[in-house]
Amino acid sequence: MNRWRWLLLLPFVVVIAFLAIRLRLNAVYRLPIDFDEMTYLPMAFRYRDMMTNGRWKEILYFRENLEHPPLNKLVFAGRLMASRAQEPDWKKLDVPMSIPPSDQTAFFGPRKLSAYAGVLQVVIIALIHPIGGLLLALDSYHIKYSAQVYLEGLPGLLAVLAVSIFELAIRRKKNSSPAEPVHWMPLIFSAVFLGLAGAGKYIYGMVGPVMLGFLIGRRVRFRQLLLFPLVALAVFILADPFLWPNPPARLWESVMYHWDYSHSQHVVSSGMPWYSPFYHLTHASPTEWHPGVFPTGIVDIIILPLGIIGIPWAIRRRPIWVAWAGFGLLFLIFWPTKWPQYTLLVLPPLCVCAGIGVEQIFRSWFKGWSRS
């Protein structure tokens, strides 16, 4: 992108960023207590207690909520340390009650961390395609789950960074050979962010196979092909202290927990079929759950159709994002648990494809209008 296009794009990105900030901070303050917040926030307070009292070794053997790695919860704990928030009396809180004034510091600090991570996702997508960034900024699922104490904001940001930098690593010059080597430094940084994304929430590591497939397709040198997964794996283990005592056994334990949970009465009784991700991606349910919090639900309904329309052009212009969207949707279909927040795994790449789709629709319309 030349300098003039950057100058034209920048004002739109700034407006989209301010819109994303306003919508997510509004959700931070107005959304009631949600289910997973009653799990992750107490865990963050437990980690805060360990960190405050110098009981660092206990973090390695803390087994509550072992199905998710501790990195995101440790970040929340750091925010609680900085704010010196008083721990709520959990017995007095329930879903979906409003947050009592005495507990707002405890909730709002971690919520804001997630919200700002969500805003940065929007900014990166807007830099890739401004229409895609606008769609992501307005999506009610993305606003909701990146404005609460969920594990979606930070890992989602790390995954977006990993793929964005990887795209720079594999970008070819015009008339270059298919076997042209990738760029070392972006490749390494991409692997670092990929490892951190998986250490934030395991399912965000699924973008790794997508990127590895592109490396294999590029026929890169073997040392580059080997370096990428090794760096990502090393960072993943280093950033996940739960794994340190015995990485293979601890990781297997987390995987088996998810398998058992997916067949638990809680999940089975929810009655979510295999196509639930497509339902979430075509229904603006958060606007029904929380009336008046979100500006519109139309965007939720159109992202998937527009993304499908944009695929033919996105394959040529941004193939890594098409691959992420496609592989991510397949992953969600086969992933046994179908909670709506999992759609945030595929919303960024779908918005890139949708933005390209909208652009091409307008281009076609303009060409037809100019010829008439």
Image (cartoon, rainbow, N blue to C red):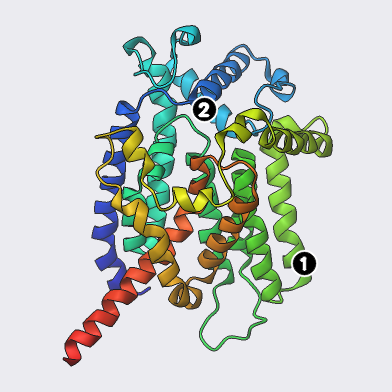
Residue situated in front as seen by the camera: 81 or 88: 88
Task: State the CA–CA distance, disc 1 to disc 2.
Answer: 42 Å
Q: Residue furthest bottom?
A: 371
Q: Position of residue 203 (x, y in %)?
A: 62, 45
Amino acid at dot 1:
Arg
Judge whether residue 122 can be spotted in this image.
yes
Give the x, y percent position of residue 194: 61, 51
Q: Position of residue 343 (x, y in %)?
A: 49, 48
Q: Is residue 9 above or below residue 181?
A: above
Mark 1 element type: helix
Q: Quadrant of residue 331?
A: bottom right
Res. 223 mark:
1
The answer to whether residue 128 is visible is no
Give the number of callouts: 2
Give the structural element (helix, strand or loop) at label 2.
Answer: loop
N-terminal of the pair, mark 1 or mark 2, is: 2
Q: Which residue is mark 2?
A: 36
For residue 359, side relative to residue 162 (left or right): left
